[in-house]
Image: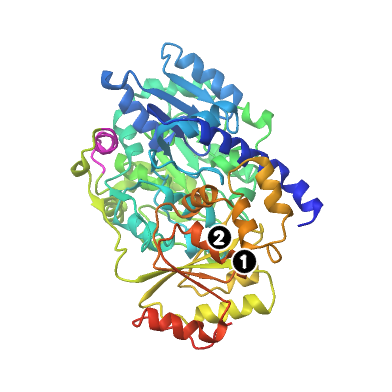
Amino acid sequence: MGIKNIIKKLPTMALAAKYARYYKKNEVDENMIFYSSHQGAGMLCGPYAIFRKLMESREFDSYTHVWQINDPAEQKQLKKEYCDWTNVKFIVKNSRGYFNALTRAKYIIVNNTLPFYFTKKPEQIYVNTWHGIPLKTLGYDVPDGKFTTRNMTRNFLLTDYLISPCRFMTKIYLESYKIGGIYTGRLLENGYPRNDLLFSTKRDDIIEKLINRCIAIDDKKKIILYAPTWKGASFKRADKDIARYDEFCDYLFEHIDTEKYQILIKPHPMVYKLLSDKEKRSGRYIPQSIDTDELLSVTDVLVSDYSSIFFDFLLTDRPVIFYIPDIDSYREYRGVYFGLHELPGPYSGDMGDIAGWINRAETLRSEYGSAYDKMKTWSCEFDDGKVTQKVNDVLLHGRQDACRVVQPDNCSKKKMLVAGGSFAPGEHTEKVLKWLDGIDYETTDVTLLIDDNGKCTDEIMHVNDNVRVLCRNGLIPRGIFSALSAELINPDKASTARLLKIFHSAAIRNNYRRILGESKFDVAANFAGECFEQALTAYHGGQSEVISEKNFDGWAAAFENAHGDWKCSKTVL
């Protein structure tokens, strides 16, 4: 590999090496819990609901609660609010405290993803609460999902517990994110812990939170919350739609009863990050550090678009209005799971329509009663205000019968792990793609593991749609010297013995857990280079037969002889 590429990778190597150092030296603390919501945006969502419930019980006074909070101003405010709680700590991503907590905490509770280097220790319990029921398509259902989903699917596969609010979301996890077939954790289909906050939040408390964060609010007026989702080329490159937000809200101010209503704007967290300091201080935009469900508990009318926020709001039985000026272009690019006629409230791309509906908001709930009740019934089926306690009973008391558990079917198909290498354009990759098309997917579950070059290539997009594509994203967490050695070596010329010395077995096994959790495979097929055969065997922990491309002519015959009920193409590389 060229020196320029190595230099470019140095910051990433340094992070992985730092994590590896803490991973090796730290023992798991049975009484430590690490929380992260929206990757450090605040004390929010499912993790916050779980934290709040634990803090109500003296039973957990001996526990240390460590929150990832990246914004210095928000950390300062939270330290003031929790000054009497010596067991509540706040840390910043990639700090010493962060690496220490991430490698020591017994319980890791997040609502999104953890960094590429995170590798769950066997003693740790990883819980992902996720953060909403989707209206817009997710995972592999998105046009470029085979690439963009890579770290999300990896995180789901690592979890011990994955929380689902309803049967629809369970299907999204298993099918749209393709974890069904190899997921070994427990899927708790039990409702969202965060929705409990709709029932338990006191109005005065959330109003005080808003005032403390410089939001201009009149506690005597009803609240209209405008909460659009992000839009743009990708999640990390969201458009900054503030001018359009302002235009829309200014129009509403001129056409609604402002003696009765006030308007608050809650940008998506990825959009809020793009605001200037002046915009953040304007008092108009709800900061990402304010919990959504606490905010919804005091909202009288919700105006949204494709955001999942409206599903939670259905529990309030208050009106929801959909302002969707770009539905045709959005539906064409991204796609949605439901038709507009199924929405639990009126929709339009015309600002005048929205203002008119707000002025008669009291009638909307009854007008759209049938659609509202139907969607509320299936999306909020398990939300009874006691979800968090049930989840905590499972996590901390071991009461596995406290929640409804869905166990994916991991036995009906043979499972194959395919090492595809760089997947660079060329004849070799074309042959792998052709070979993948020849597999009988009625009997075989296939995971393709490829190198992450940071780009969604045509080759990735042409992988058979039945295949679960995962990337070896990031670098193996290990010492910086070992990482540099691995970058400098030419794997096509190195002996397997030397390669295995660099990719020593412990690092390889940890890397397997980093990418695939505890997933098990019946066969591993190696198309990543001949010298990787033994490395892949070690990587896979000796759990399965490893077939290499060394003998192309006999590969298909040997494969079918070993697994007679499997069918694969006679045309191999």
Q: Quadrant of residue 91?
A: top right
> Quadrant of the image for the C terminus?
bottom right
Residue at 51% over, 55% down = 324
Question: Who is closer to the viewer here, 543 or 137?
Answer: 543
Q: Where does label 2 land, which residue?
A: 535
**How many marks on residues?**
2
Above or below, 87 relative to 176: above
Residue under the point 58% across and 51% down = 235
Q: What secondary structure is marked by label 2? A: helix
**Magenta region, main secondary structure:** helix
Q: Which residue is outermost to the front?
A: 497
In the current view of this chain or complex, which residue is farthest to the left? 401
Vertical position of residue 119 compared to residue 435: above or below: above
| Image location of residue 204, percent across then percent down | 38, 20
Residue under pointer 1: 531
How is the protein colored in the picture?
rainbow
Above or below 562: residue 213: above
The numbered disc on residue 9 is none
Rate crowding at label 1 as few (under 14), some (14 to 19) or many (20 or more) other CA atoms within 10 Å.
Answer: many
> What segment carries the magenta color?
383-396
User: Residue 392: percent from the left, percent from the top?
Assistant: 28, 34
- Determine crowd level at label 2: few under 14, some 14-19, many 20+ residues with C-alpha closer than 10 A: many
Q: Mark 1–mark 2 contact, CB under 8 Å?
A: yes
Instruction: Please say whether residue 288 is visible from this viewpoint.
Output: no
Whether 447 is among the magenta residues is no
Q: Position of residue 525 (x, y in %)?
A: 50, 71
Measured Cα–Cα span from mark 1 to mark 2 = 8 Å
Q: Secondary structure at mark 1?
A: helix
